[in-house]
Image (cartoon, rainbow, N blue to C red):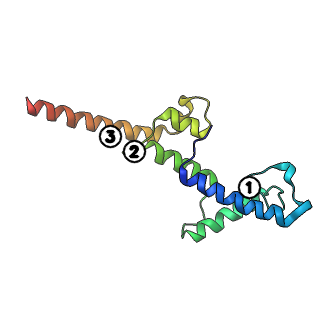
């Protein structure tokens, strides 16, 4: 199960309103039997190229480079979640990614996690020095 932020829920609700308008405009021609969240205006599925083309348009509208791939975004999100002062634990990130085991996540992102371990060692060194100096 994937938890969603309040902003994501609002965005999806807005998308549903637009989709309902598409459904009404298409009338009997709407492919409601597929019940897709993201569909063409007639309810039919997007092809892989169509989704990728829409992603490229989004990148351009945000002023981002066009050589980004969707799978790369997945890795960027995972890396961002695993690093920094607001980092998320490995099992939680792994579940978000659909990994069956935290070991899978740890294996795929070992290079990122090594940086976290290095920072943890430096932080422990600072804590111990502060405590030793206070005594």
Q: Which mark is residue 86?
A: 2
In front: label 2 or label 3: 2
As measured in the structure, the alpha-carbon distance from the residue carrying label 1 to the one carrying label 3 is 41 Å
Q: Is residue 31 above or below residue 93?
A: below
Label 2: element kind = loop
Q: Position of residue 88 (x, y in %)?
A: 45, 39
Q: Is residue 90 left or right of residue 128?
A: right
As measured in the structure, the alpha-carbon distance from the residue carrying label 1 to the one carrying label 2 is 31 Å
Q: Which mark is residue 38?
A: 1
Tell me the quarter of the picture where residue 123 sits: top left
Q: Is residue 133 left or right of residue 7?
A: left
Label 1: element kind = loop
As measured in the structure, the alpha-carbon distance from the residue carrying label 2 to the one carrying label 3 is 14 Å
Q: Please tell me which residue lies in front, 74 or 41.
A: 41
N-term-proximal mark, 1 vs 2 = 1
Which residue sits at x=54%, y=35%?
105
Reading the image, the residue beneath label 3 is 119
Tell me the quarter of the picture where residue 23 sits: bottom right
Which residue sits at x=81%, y=55%?
45
Q: Is residue 63 above or below residue 112?
A: below
User: What crowding class fits label 1: few (fewer than 14 Cα within 10 Å), some (14-19), or many (20 or more)?
Assistant: some
Label 3: element kind = helix
Q: Position of residue 4 (x, y in %)?
A: 57, 46
Q: Please tell me which residue lies in front, 85 or 118.
A: 85
Q: Is residue 123 left or right of residue 59?
A: left
N-term-proximal mark, 2 vs 3 = 2
Query: On the rendered image, what quadrant is the N terminus found in?
Result: top right
């Amino acid at each position: 199960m994937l938890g969603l932020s309040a902003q994501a829920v609002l965005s999806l609700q807005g998308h549903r309103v637009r989709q309902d308008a598409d459904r009404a405009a298409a009338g009997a021609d709407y492919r409601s039997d597929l019940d897709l969240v993201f569909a063409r205006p007639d309810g039919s599925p997007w092809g892989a190229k169509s989704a990728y083309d829409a992603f490229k348009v989004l990148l351009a509208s945000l002023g981002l480079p066009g050589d980004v791939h969707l799978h790369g975004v997945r890795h960027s999100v995972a890396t961002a979640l695993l690093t920094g002062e607001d980092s998320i634990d490995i099992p939680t990130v792994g579940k978000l990614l659909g990994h069956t085991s935290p070991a899978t996540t740890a294996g795929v992102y070992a290079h990122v996690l090594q940086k976290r371990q290095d920072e943890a060692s430096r932080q422990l060194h600072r804590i111990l020095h502060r405590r030793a100096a206070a005594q």
